[in-house]
Amino acid sequence: MTRQTLAWHETMELHELVASQSIGLMKLKMGLRNIDDNLLRTIYIQTINELETGIKELLQFYPSAPQAGHTGGYRVTDSFYAGDLLVFAKTAVRNLSIAITETATPALRKVLTKQLNQAIAMHERIFLYMYYKGQYPAYDLTKLLRNDMNLARQALSM
């Protein structure tokens, strides 16, 4: 079966990957200038190259996304830092959730549960901030994907 567009659920997964990888790529590129160790610098450069290739591969699917559009540039501003915090919060929720499923000690489970609830609240705070500032148009897929493409282009052009 050949489809002309991506399914909604895979479009959202694509969005999550491109957004988080673009922010990660920008952080790696900004941090590269501070690395003195040659071996670590080589590892960073290889990682940067692999991320750039991966993002370019994923961007090829954006024209097949439902209602995807194209627009201008992206600037590193508060929205970059907010996006970075959002990715951090999502990762914290996922990691704490996984850790809880591996925990046998009740006292540790209690601490991890408390931290999970804090991470969920952190995610809500930063999401709402981004949503109300127009940085995360969660209910407008076209704008959401347009923001991803702009972020990815900025990360690739650094």
Image: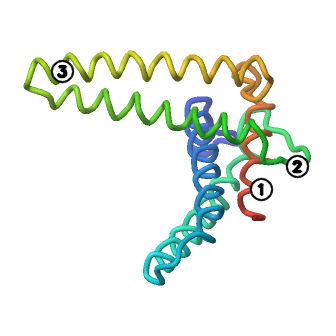
Q: Quadrant of the N terminus?
A: top right
Q: Tell me the crowding category of disc 1: few under 14, some 14 to 19, or many 20 or more residues within 10 angstroms, Cα based.
A: some
Where is residue 111 drawn, in percent x and y? Answer: 24, 20
Q: Which residue is mark 1?
A: 153
Q: Amino acid at mark 2?
A: Gly
Q: Which residue is mark 2?
A: 73
How far apart marks 3 and 1 lie (CA) works out to: 42 Å
Q: Are marks 1 and 2 in contact (CB under 8 Å)?
A: yes
How far apart marks 3 and 2 lie (CA) works out to: 45 Å
Q: Quadrant of the C terminus?
A: bottom right
Q: Is residue 153 left or right of residue 83?
A: right
SS at mark 1 in the image: helix
Query: Which residue is found at the position 49% from the left and 80% from the top?
Result: 42
Query: Which residue is found at the position 49% from the left and 16% from the top?
Result: 121
Q: Pick the residue in front: 51 or 70.
A: 51
In the displayed structure, 81 sits above or below 44; it is above
SS at mark 3 in the image: helix
Q: Pick the residue in front: 37 or 102.
A: 37
Query: Which residue is found at the position 38% from the left and 31% from the top?
Result: 94
Q: Quadrant of residue 85?
A: top right
Where is residue 81 drawn, in percent x and y? Answer: 67, 40
In the displayed structure, 96 sits above or below 155; it is above
Q: Are marks 3 and 2 in contact (CB under 8 Å)?
A: no
> Mark 3, mark 2: which one is toward the viewer?
3
The circle on residue 109 is: 3
SS at mark 2 in the image: loop
Q: Amino acid at mark 3?
A: Arg
